[in-house]
Amino acid sequence: MLAVNYTHARNNLKSLIDTVCDNEEEVIITTKNNRSVVLLSLDEYNQTHAQVKQSIKRSLEQIERGEVMSIDEAFELAMKSYRD
């Protein structure tokens, strides 16, 4: 992942867009007041968005089927995994 400041991004926007789209690489753009954004291709955004929607759909289906565990069960399972 490439990180550039706002001035560089403004002066080289076309090149950064080409880099992001051609190399499937994200670019972090930072400002002087510590605010940042990530530049990513529309294809990557759409793919990620679709994956999130599918994950949410599967999770809701599991909840509807009653396939859930309490926070205590989840914590115990995580701790067991950590110890092993």
Image (tube, rainbow, N blue to C red):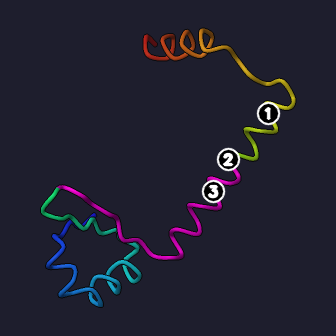
Task: Please state, as top left, top right, bottom left or bottom right, where the N terminus lies in the image.
Answer: bottom left
Q: Is residue 21 left or right of residue 13?
A: right
Q: CA distance from mark 2 to mark 3?
A: 6 Å
Furthest residue in direction front, as rendered: 33
Seen at 34% across and 87% down, the residue is 18
Residue occupying image coordinates x 62% and y 53%: 52
Q: Dot 2 corresponds to which residue?
A: 55
User: Toward the viewer: 52 or 25?
Assistant: 52
User: Is 68 positioned to the left or the right of 10 in the image?
Assistant: right
In the image, 36 versus 71, the foreground residue is: 36
Majority secondary structure in the magenta region? helix
Say above or below: 3 vs 8: above
User: How dense is the environment of label 1, judged by Cα within 10 Å: few (below 14), some, or many (20 and up)?
Assistant: few
Residue 23 is marked as none
Give the residue number, with chain letter if any, for mark 1: 62
Q: Secondary structure at mark 2?
A: helix
Secondary structure under tag 3 reads: helix
At label 3, which amino acid type do we have? Gln
Q: What's under tag 1, amino acid-wise?
A: Gln
Answer with mark 2 or mark 1, whichever residue precedes in sequence. 2
Element carrying mark 1: helix
For label 2, count other residues whose C-alpha is less than 10 Å away and answer few (under 14), some (14-19) or many (20+).
Answer: few
Q: Which stretch did the figure color magenta?
A: 34-54
Q: Position of residue 28 (x, y in %)?
A: 27, 65
Residue named by callout 3: 51
Residues at discs 2 and 3 in contact (Cβ within 8 Å): yes
How far apart marks 2 and 1 lie (CA) works out to 11 Å
Which residue sits at x=83%, y=24%? 66
The number of numbered discs placed on residues in the rendered structure image is 3
Q: Nearer the viewer, residue 31 or 59?
A: 31
Measured in 3D between alpha carbons, the distance from the residue under mark 3 to the one under mark 1, in whole angstroms, is: 17 Å
